[in-house]
Amino acid sequence: MPLVTTGEIVGTAVRAGLGAGAFNVIQIEHAQAIVAGAEAAGAPVILQISENAVRYHGALAAIGRAAVEVARAARVPVAVHLDHATGPELVREAVELGFGSVMFDASALDYDGNVEATAEVAADCHAHGVWVEAELGEVGGKDGVHAPGARTDPAEAAAYVAATGVDALAVAVGTSHAMVAKTAVVDLALVAALRAAVSVPLVLHGSSGVPEADLTRAVEAGLTKVNIATHLNVAYTRAIRAHLADHPEVVDPRRYVAAGRDAVAREVTRLLGLVRATH
C-alpha cells in the first residue's frame, strides 16, 4: 500500500469522529509490531520517531528509512511522523527522507519565540507538502506543555494556531510523558472547550498514563491524534523478561526480541480499539 501522511489519517478520523493512534518507534521491531497490530485491527496507524530515538541511534537516516519501508509494505494505511523535534535541521532531514509529517516542539521558548520559530518551520514544511503538529508551551514552565498541572488556554491556543499556520496542536489537558501508572486525569471539559475554540485537530501526548476508558472518552470529547509510547515499552520489556526467565538458555536475540514484538502488536490492536481508530 502506498505511504500515506499523518494529515490524511488524522483528516479522515476527524471527518468520521474517530481517533488516530500514533505509536513511537525505537527499534525496527517496534515499527513491525505497530504495523502488525494495525493490520490485525484493520485500522490506519502512525509510526512516530522522536528526537530522543534519533539520539539513541546516532542519526535519523537508518531508523527513519526502515520505518518508511515497513510502512510501505503494510496492508493498512501507515504514516511516518517525526515526533518532538526541537530544531529545524532534524525537521529538514525528516522531510528529505520522505516523512509526511513532523511535530515541531518549540515549547521551551516563550510564547513569542515559539510562534516565530514554529511559523518558520510550518511555512518551510508546507512548501514541501508536509503536515505540521506543534506544541503550545507553558510560559515559564521548565517542562513545557506537559509539565504536571499545565493546562492549555483555549483562546491562546486559537491565537497560536492562527499565528503559526500549523495543522494540529498538542494540548495540555492533564497528562504528562513517561507515565507507567495510569493515574492521569484528563480534563474532558477543557478538551471540549479546546475543540470548540481551535480550528485544527487536537493531539494528546502522554497517553500512556491515561486510564483506558478515559482514552475513549477523550476522543469522544474532541481529541483526535493519540500518542502512545511508554505503555508499549512496558509491554515490550515485560514480554522479553518473561521469555528470558522461562528460557534462560536462550542467547539468540531474535527469539526473545520476537516475544517483545508480538506483545507490542497485541497491545497496538487493543489500543486502536480504545481510541476508536476504526468503526
Image (tube, rainbow, N blue to C red):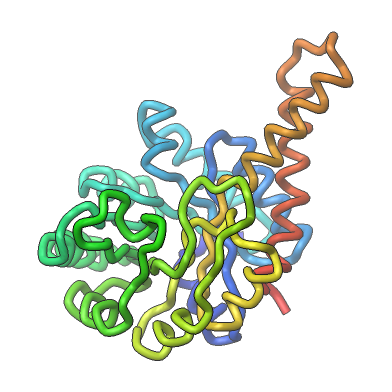
Quadrant into which the C terminus falls: bottom right
In this view, the residue farthest toward the right is 246
x and y, in percent, of residue 178 in the image: 51, 45
Determine the image quadrant of residue 138. Answer: bottom left
235 sits left or right of 96 in the view: right
Q: Residue at x 68, y 32 (%)?
A: 237
198 sits left or right of 87 in the view: right
Q: Can residue 9 be seen in this view?
A: no
Note whether 113 is above or below 108 in the view shown: below
x and y, in percent, of residue 6 in the image: 47, 65
x and y, in percent, of residue 13 in the image: 56, 78
x and y, in percent, of residue 220 in the image: 60, 82
Q: Which sits in the foreground, 157 or 73?
A: 157
In this view, the residue farthest toward the bottom is 196
Q: Which sits in the foreground, 110 or 55?
A: 110
Q: Which residue is drawn at 76% across and 60% down?
A: 270
Quadrant into which the N terminus falls: bottom right
Q: Can residue 274 be seen in this view?
A: yes
75 sits left or right of 124 in the view: right
Determine the image quadrant of residue 158. Answer: bottom left
Q: Which sits in the foreground, 222 or 151?
A: 151
Q: Which residue is drawn at 68% across and 44% down?
A: 33
Q: Which residue is drawn at 55% across and 59% down?
A: 207
- Number of numbered discs: 0
